[in-house]
Amino acid sequence: MPDQSGNPLGTFLRDRRSRMDPAAFGFGGGRRRTPGLRREEVAQRANISPTWYTWLEQGRGGAPSADVLNRLAAGLMLTEPEREHLFILGLGRAPVARYAACDDVTPRLQRVLDALPLSPAIIKTATWDVVAWNRAAATLLTDYAKLPREERNVLRLIFTNPRTRAAQADWLNVARYVVGAFRADAARAGAGVEIKQLVDELSSASPEFSALWRENDVIGRADGLKRLRHPEHGLIELEFSVFAVDGRPDLGMLVYNPASRESARRVEALMAQATG
């Protein structure tokens, strides 16, 4: 058998199969020289040749295909980070993104939002559905709790909600940014199929969206300036930054901070008014 020291893929595969309980998958127990599944049992679960699987563990036979790696990931019940690691070891790259819709966040992540009393913050999916927000976001941006779940989408609000549109001091720049960033996020997450209905709907409802979508612009910038008009407190300028959520590539956290002392004062006044 070839030396395994230079075969990190084989080492990873052996480690993962050694952690699996044969009885849990209907394989006979009996005496086994080593813990976990046998090679032929992993091959059976992954629907590949036992010989080919053995070669993978031994570092023989060349690079496996993406299909084989996906079968191994399923057969070994790998988590998404483990599946990504398997692809990096086997092919030198991450797997093609597979989008999984999400409509909630953990209590811990919600507490992160709530710890920002004067900074509007939201959690959005790769298709720009808003799935979590703090009180500042509800006060300054949109009270998402009052909207049906399907309407809590940033693009729908920007292009079809008159109140949201009127609040933007430079609506066209906001709209152009949102469309370009949305396109980039959806492609990165592999959500091309999932966004088709929304794109078709907005293209019919909004000539502006249709025109911007046809421009095919892609925007990767994760920060900028948002200017809001408030009927009582005037212009409020907010700097925004987008943060990835560790372990959740489908989610992004968008945080707004007052861009000046005057804007901070107006945010404080708004929040105090909402509390009162």
Image (tube, grey):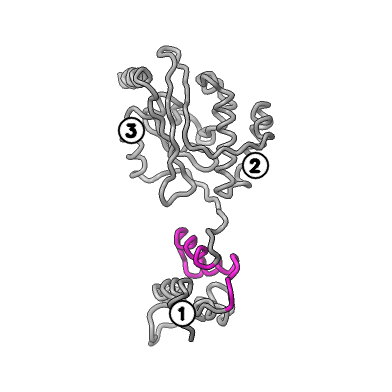
Is residue 118 rendered to the left or right of residue 223? left
Residue visible at 57% across and 44% down in the picture: 186
Q: Which one is in front in this view, the residue at disc 3 or the one at disc 2? A: 3
In the rendered image, residue 211, in percent from the top left (x then y), is placed at 68, 30
Residue 238 lies in magenta, yes or no?
A: no
In the rendered image, residue 248, in percent from the top left (x then y), is placed at 44, 49
Is residue 122 rendered to the left or right of residue 49? left
- Check whether the beta carbons of the residues at disc 2 and disc 1 lie within 8 A of each other: no
Give the residue number, with chain letter if any, for mark 2: 196
Q: Mark 2 is on which residue type?
A: Lys
Q: Secondary structure at mark 1?
A: loop
Task: State how far apart marks 3 and 1 are (Cα).
Answer: 52 Å
Quadrant where the image shows the C terminus? top left
In the rendered image, residue 3, in percent from the top left (x then y), is placed at 45, 82
Question: Is tag 3's residue or tag 1's residue first in the polypeptide sequence?
Answer: 1
Q: Mark 1 is on which residue type?
A: Phe
Mark 3, Cα crowd under 10 Å, few <14 / some 14-19 / many 20+, is some
Q: Give above or below for 69 relative to 267.
A: below
Question: Is tag 2's residue or tag 1's residue first in the polypeptide sequence?
Answer: 1
Is residue 165 rendered to the left or right of residue 19? right
Farthest residue, direction front: 6
Q: Which mark is residue 208?
A: none
**Main secondary structure along the magenta-highlighted residues:** helix
Give the residue number, with chain letter if any, for mark 3: 116
Magenta range is: 61-90
Give the residue number, with chain letter if any, for mark 1: 27
Question: Is tag 3's residue or tag 2's residue first in the polypeptide sequence?
Answer: 3
Residue visible at 53% across and 68% down in the picture: 90
Q: Secondary structure at mark 2?
A: helix
